[in-house]
Image (cartoon, rainbow, N blue to C red):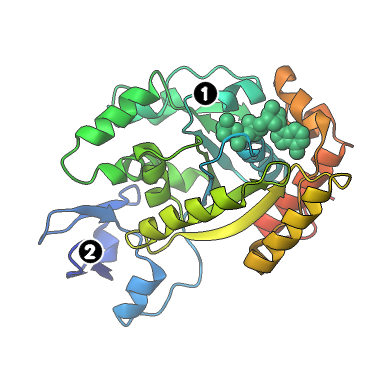
Amino acid sequence: MILICPHCKKRHDVDEKRIPANVKMARCKYCEQRFPIRPSEKAVEQAGEKVPEAKDGPRRISISLSKGGVGKTTTAVNLSMGLSIAGFKVLLVDTDTQGQVGFMLGVTLRAGLLELVTRELAAEDVLVQARERLWVLAGGKSLAGLKRLIDRKDFGGELTLTEVLAPLESRFDYIIVDTSPGWDPLIVNVLFYVNEVLTPVSLETMTLQGLVEFLKNLSIIQKYNKDISLKYVLPTFMDKRVKKSDSIMKKLEELYGEIICEPIRYNVRLSEAPAYGKSIYEFAPGSKGAKDYRRLVRRVAGDDELLR
Ligand SMILES: Nc1ncnc2c1ncn2[C@@H]1O[C@H](COP(=O)(O)OP(=O)(O)OP(=O)(O)O)[C@@H](O)[C@H]1O
Ligand SMILES: [Mg+2]
């Protein structure tokens, strides 16, 4: 198997059989940078090899937009929960200091990413099983501490998250990452790790500008993480009674066409569920919110029969 270092582009001829199953990162013998062993399809093509048909490893999706309050966490929780109900094994990673994910699922999360990065604790001690087939990894004691730790690294800081999450991948079908509003080293880390981005856009507040700015930043990341793409734009807070909702929706369709998902309607049940530590499927399974998120699960999983 040919591995191409993403940093210095040197080729390495590696005997695949000699790589232990749990080892996911390699170190380039020329520039000494570490990089994920799983080559991008492009790198494999460039090396003249056949593109592998079966995708190994989980799908890695971040729920991101720099603007606050657009439904990122609500989407991360209900998408993850829906996928787990549909039979997939899901890891939901909370990289926001607000710690909303644990609250919304009614679980207490103490340790997390920081302790994994510092090797204070092992994965078994920090992964919390929230439901059948759904595990949660929190920021941990201090996400601020994690950001400082990333900042202090001389090089490779942007791969900190990749290094701790890669060894866990074989256990899951999906890794969903909820991100905080704003733009900081942790979000950069998330975007170096995932290969798909789902961006919620609120139809209630004008966030098109926010989307354009976020996409500018994302295109900078794409220079380094060639695998990442904006896969879904999810309109949220759709309210048919509000004219603005319709006009923003039309604009989104014009601009982003096929990657636009069916909208999540404004639904008060979605805002009530977190206080009970329940997902929308548990709290109000017949609500508009539950129907809309089930539809999103089908779209993301690419299976129209799920959760019918
Ligand atoms: N479709 C919806 N209808 C009604 N309320 C909603 C809907 N989606 C989310 N909410 C509520 O709106 C608020 C903001 O949602 P959420 O926390 O998911 O946004 P966020 O983008 O994660 O915010 P932040 O940027 O602060 O992390 C929450 O109180 C949530 O319960
Ligand atoms: Mg949030």
Q: Is residue 114 visible?
A: yes
- Is residue 58 among the parts visible in the rendering? no
Q: Quadrant of ligand 1?
A: top right
Give the x, y percent position of residue 108. Answer: 56, 16
Secondary structure beneath label 2: loop
Q: Residues within 10 Å of mark 1 (few under 14, many from 20)?
A: few
| Residue 169 screen position, x and y as percent | 44, 46
User: Which label belongs to residue 246?
Assistant: none
**In x, y percent, where is residue 4?**
24, 68
Q: Which part of the image, by quadrant, shows the N terminus?
A: bottom left
Q: Nearer the viewer, residue 59 or 143?
A: 143
Residue at 61% over, 27% down:
130
Q: In which quarter of the image is residue 37?
A: bottom left
Residue pictured at 38% horizontal, 66% vertical: 40
Q: Is mark 1 on a helix, strand or loop?
A: loop
Please tell me which of labels 2 and 1 falls first in the chain: 2
Q: Distance between the residues labelled 2 and 1?
A: 36 Å
Whether residue 74 is situated above or below residue 115 in the rendered picture: below
Mark 1, ligand 1, within 8 Å: the answer is yes
What's under tag 1, amino acid-wise?
A: Gln
The residue lying toward the viewer, choosing from 197 and 93, is 197
Q: Residue at x 38, y 38 (%)?
A: 184
Picture quarter containing residue 19? bottom left
43 is higher (above) or lower (below) than 290: below
Q: Which amino acid does label 2 sit on?
A: Cys
Relative to 8, residue 160 above or below:
above
Q: Identify residue for label 2.
A: 5
Name the residue tied to disc 1: 98
